[in-house]
Image (spheres, helix red, strand yellow):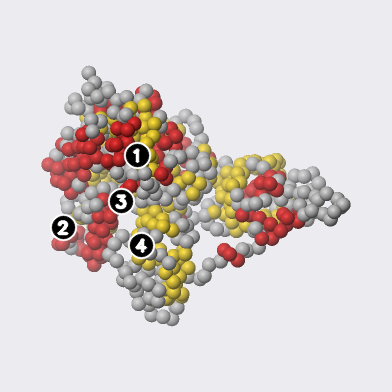
Amino acid sequence: MRSDVIHTLLVANRGEIACRIFRTCRDLGITTVAVYSDADADALHVREADLAVRLLGAAPADTYLRGDLVVAAARAAGADAVHPGYGFLSENAAFAAAVQDAGLVWVGPPVKAIELMASKTRAKELMAGAGVPLLAPVDPATAGPDDLPLLLKAAAGGGGRGMRIVRELDALPGELLAAAAEAASAFGDGEVFAEPYVERGRHVEVQVMADAHDTVWALGTRDCSLQRRHQKVIEEAPAPSLDEALRTRLHEAAVAAARAVGYRGAGTVEFLVSAEGRPYFLEMNTRLQVEHPVTEAVFGLDLVALQLRVAEGEPLPSPEPPQPSGHAVEARLYAEDPARDWQPQTGALLTLEVPEGPGLRLDTGYTGGDTIGVHYDPMIAKVIAHAPTRTEAVRLLARALERARVHGPVTNRDLLVRSLRHPDFAAARLDTGFYDRHLADLTAPGAGDLATAALAATLAEAVRGPEAVRGTEAVRGAEAVRGAEAVRPTRPGGPAPARFGAWRNVPSQPQRKRYRSEPDGTEHEVAYRTPRTGTPEPYETPGTRVLTVTPDRVSLEVDGVTRHFTVTAHADRVHVDAADASYTFTALPRFTDPATHTAPGSLLAPMPGTVVRLAEGLAAGVTVEAGQPLIWLEAMKMEHRILAPASGTLTALHAAPGHQVEVGALLAVVQEDPAATPVPVPVPEETA
């Protein structure tokens, strides 16, 4: 008999995980409650919930991390249960206790289990007693050359914060201070520990599900080795290339870990697997994981539904889990630029369309027209593919991402497609150093036909008409003058003014259009003319023939092959989607706008964010060295260094800790002096 039937559930989270939990609640007939910050007032999870409660403020510390406000919101909305999702308060034992103290059902593990696993150092001690394989800890005070390389990790929290790889003993003291400072800032706990760093290790984890009736399921393995900044990018289930003995050992260790803490609900036990196939316990995440959909696909389960079932006191459906079937792969679509140190991107997400079909799933917290802000993680969506074999699942996912229409901020979509098709990934040669080795190749300019895509953009604009173009940033300067001449009133009594499209009324003469491709900045000039037929055609482009042209679709025959392009214009930006690639162009004026120039040596903010600190002693007049970190920005849960572009003198400093800056804001100016002997500004022993 159920002891705690859930009728109304509040999700103490946002974005795609809130939307995903709401989806299961709708299937089960449970009323849903969202909480939201001011920045999320019109977010998708708010729109999809039955009820919503505002948390005054925008920053996570003022909203989603305020457990007292979340509990008060649950009471105000009449909720009888709280699901934490992942991140934020999901592994906060005090919050779990507060939810239960308020008489609400906590859809998560026991408070004691969260406490026992909250500290990685204490968790490792507990796991050693349970017989779970571990890496031997290293005392930094006595570490020697034979202990290198070392991995420094924060005892609290996760997500790669407070993590450092140390390869030289001389660097160890500074990296310890840096890791401790970042850990204290991120988690309020500066405890750091050291262990051997396993080169070419794989990140393999086991999903567990446990009830209060002594049943613990090990739901297979997942490989999450493809990571950037110690955060996962591509995950799959089951983990490939593991022999059955190793799989069995991982399953048994995960079950032992869950039983050791009296676990209930969904959790994940994470391991590092060496190149020799030896597993080592990393940590246990006492919550649902971002990558849970691949396990759901392989086992045919709804893990959220099972979480709710267990929270209501019910047993799992059977003593043993269902049999797995097929292979699933998940890719995290981020608003970030991998070619520029993974810089997060913000702005309007104009279009988000991912192909639908058998074996494909989309989990997202956004729709086209939403805005990606600066306060939260830059993940836009998760795209999941499930098929009978790994090869088929990888191919299906790569093709779905390739065909997706994602317009707005720069994303990692191309990186994902290339990663999935990389020979090492195809052969399951996986380890956490994948991007360290391959990032340059994976972010190099693609082999796509930029020139033909720019031609398609030009032809579509030529028939789009002046109203769609006039007034945008693309018609500044001389372009604006040309547009004005086309509609200039005549003298009184004269003939009515002629109105033309976005081209001159000289059909025999070619017109030219300039674009800059994003994000690489390559410029393209396209020449076309409009004959008396009215259909624009390329000028001096042999081998290319126009088949059809409309304002949003262009079909061209290129060297005998018909290619179709979908063209979408947003102000001065044009998105061109083809069958095998997508392109973004910025329309350029005929003449350069002097207002776009900045002084040499200017340090501009690469993204909106908050200035968190400056290099020690940084002030106008000091000398700096090329490549030296000067300013630290925090945006979307990540820190980014602003480096000196050259050796010389800092002639201006406009940044200060706490300042909110927009993208392109002038932070400082360095006047280059190659002959000078720079006196470096001291670099604080903090996050690099």
Residue that numbered label 3 is attached to = 160
- Choose the circle earlier in sequence order: 2 or 4: 2
In three-dimensional space, the C-alpha distance between marks 2 and 3, rounded to whole angstroms, equals 21 Å
- Which mark is first along the chain, 3 or 4? 3
Q: Residue 192 got which mark? A: none
Give 388 or 22, whichever is nearer the viewer: 22
Amino acid beneath label 1: Asn
Front-most of 155 and 297? 155
Task: Work out whether 649 lies above or below 358.
Answer: below
Q: Earlier in the sequence, mark 2 or mark 1?
A: 1
Verify CB contact (< 8 Å) between mark 2 and mark 1: no
Contact? badges 1 and 4 (CB < 8 Å): no
Q: Is residue 381 visible?
A: no
Q: Position of residue 183 (x, y in %)?
A: 26, 54
Q: How many neighbours does mark 3 have within 10 angstroms: few (below 14), some (14-19), or many (20 or more)?
A: some
Q: Which mark is residue 13?
A: 1
**Could you tell which of marks 1 and 3 lies nearer the N-terminus?**
1
Task: Name the kind of residue labelled 3 in the image.
Answer: Gly
The image quarter containing residue 287 is: top left
Label located before the other in sequence (1 or 4): 1
Q: Identify the disc placed on residue 657.
A: 4
Q: Earlier in the sequence, mark 2 or mark 3?
A: 2
From the viewer's perspective, tell me whether residue 650 is left or right of residue 522.
left
Quick one: quadrant of the C terminus?
bottom left
Which callout, 1 or 3, points to the residue nearer the camera?
1
Q: Find out whether the residues at labels 4 and 3 contact each other: C-beta distance under 8 Å.
A: no
**Residue identified by numbered label 2:** 139
Q: Residue at x 26, y 48 (%)?
A: 157
Question: Where residue 193 sits in the image (x, y, percent)?
Answer: 20, 54
